[in-house]
Image (tube, rainbow, N blue to C red):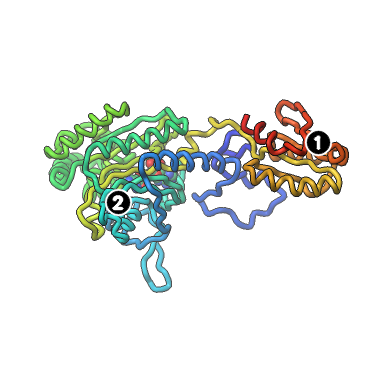
Amino acid sequence: MGGSTPGGGAQYTILSPAAHEETVLLYKSVKGMHDLIPPASKLWSKIEKTAQTLFESFGFQKIVTPIVEEADLFMRSVGETSEVVQKQMYVFKDKKDKTLCLRPEGTASVARAYVEHRLFHPEPYQKLYYWGPMYRYERMQQGRYRQHFQVGVEVFGSADPRIDAETIYVLSQFYQKLGISNFQTEINSIGDATCRPKFRDLLVSYFKKYEKDLSEDGKLLLERNPLRLFDSKEEAIQKICQSAPVITQHLCVPCKTHFEAVQRALTQLNVSYHVNPHIVRGLDYYCKTAFEIVSGGLGAQNALGAGGRYDGLVQSLGGPDIPAFGFATGIERLMLALEGTQEPGYDVDVFVCALGEKAQAFAFGLVNKMRMQNISTEVDYEDRALKKQMQKADRMNARYVLIVGDTEIEKGEAVLRNMKTKVQKDISFSNILEVLQREILK
Ligand code: HAM
């Protein structure tokens, strides 16, 4: 990610250390973990508000779970042979020798909380959404970080294929509301406990024919989790995958019927999608529908968001047999997809330039009244010359400047200057708040 441009297109980044030669950087943020600073934080807040409004209008309620969980939770749910658990988890012991970790994803945590708080009682159907940091010790590249944020939803208590389609629809609507249109929805069914083991055997016998062409990693995948071979970036493996059997042709009748119904519902919702039988997902809890939304402009890490059905997870964590479906989308990848598309906007509505003791006293009361009317306001208490204050207003990216000096105090009027058009007008103290509100709403 590049440098931050004050007042310009927001980027999720920090200023490069070289830009501050007068600073000795004693500490830097840990590799793969980023500070979120203005102006990028403005876009971040917009994404958060858009998610909240949209998800709540679909009936999702917020859930917040701790960042630290027992490591075993993810071994059981995400899977001991998964790359996330094998290679990427931040695992540590606490003072009582308990094995804990920084959560690598949100679904297992939310399912754990659903079981722990008996959220299935009396009504199993629950729709929850979350926002927060996830941790994966991954090789870094654009769009792949060791701390990343996800916003996600989980629907518990319905096996209906319309829930799969509706939830995929929510995610596509979220992207559209943010102004992202360059994305593609790829769906697959990865079967269930009836058909997947049979398909797995079929796949193993197919790949065995090419075992000599597989790398050590490929051989390990073949032994432990052959479906994941479809996800491999190795060219040789990808070539072998091209003629491999595909799961969509080996689904049992209930999985096939479910997948067809999901597709009909997606069509009804006008979601354009593409069936990609090579989507397998890296987390073991999935069954039936799995999907990814990819974006052309993101480079190698092109998955904006992903999810699927995980009917067995709640029961495997000690709860009742309750089906579920969900997705998560990475916030940093959204920031990248939206880079350069945002209007710069203003950081402050009004900067008050107060000149002289009386004006300073007047401004001190006024700015706090303005703030209480939701007019974002800044002021300079240093009692500097007008030119210096105007420069500060400019640096602070103010939309208006309100000038008050001794003359204005005597006249009972202030000067309001539009910083963009440079047009100035006098406004009476008696209706200052009213006028400002009107101007700012324009
Ligand atoms: P996931 O595909 O592992 O799924 O991650 C979801 C999204 O998080 C990805 O599509 C990507 O946008 C973002 N992401 C993942 N890893 C990184 C990373 N290292 N750096 C930046 N962004 C990243 C899950 O985590 C599932 N829990 C999704 C789900 C919810 N399934 C059902 N419900």
Estimate how packed mark 1 is, as few (under 14), some (14 to 19) or many (20 or more) residues with alpha carbons within 10 Å: many
The quarter of the displayed image where residue 16 is located:
top right
State whether residue 219 appears in this view. Answer: no
* Residue nearest the observer in this picture, 67 or 82: 67
Q: Name the outermost residue toward the front.
A: 430
Q: Which residue is at 75% across, 31% downward?
A: 417
At 31% from the left and 26% from the top, the residue drawn is 270
Q: Which residue is mark 2?
A: 82
Please tell me whether mark 1 or mark 2 is closer to you in this view.
Answer: 1
Q: Which residue is mark 1?
A: 413
Q: What amino acid is found at the position of numbered circle 2 in the picture?
A: Ser
Percent of width and height locating residue 238: 28, 36
The mark total stands at 2
Q: Is residue 144 visible?
A: yes
Horizontal side of 416 relative to 154 (left or right) equals: right
Q: CA gap, disc 1 to disc 2?
A: 69 Å
Q: Residue at x 75, y 27 (%)?
A: 422
Badge 1 amino acid: Glu
Single out the residue that lies furthest toward the bottom: 96
Mark 2 crowd level (few <14, some 14–19, many ≥20, 10 Å Cα): many
The answer to whether residue 38 is left or right of residue 138 is right
Does the closest atom of ligand 1 sit within 8 Å of the Cβ of label 1? no
Of residues 264 and 250, which is closer to you in this image? 264
Ligand 1 lies in quarter: top left
Front-most of 36 and 127?
127
Indicate the secondary structure of the residue bearing disc 2.
loop
Q: Residue 316: x and y, percent?
A: 23, 57
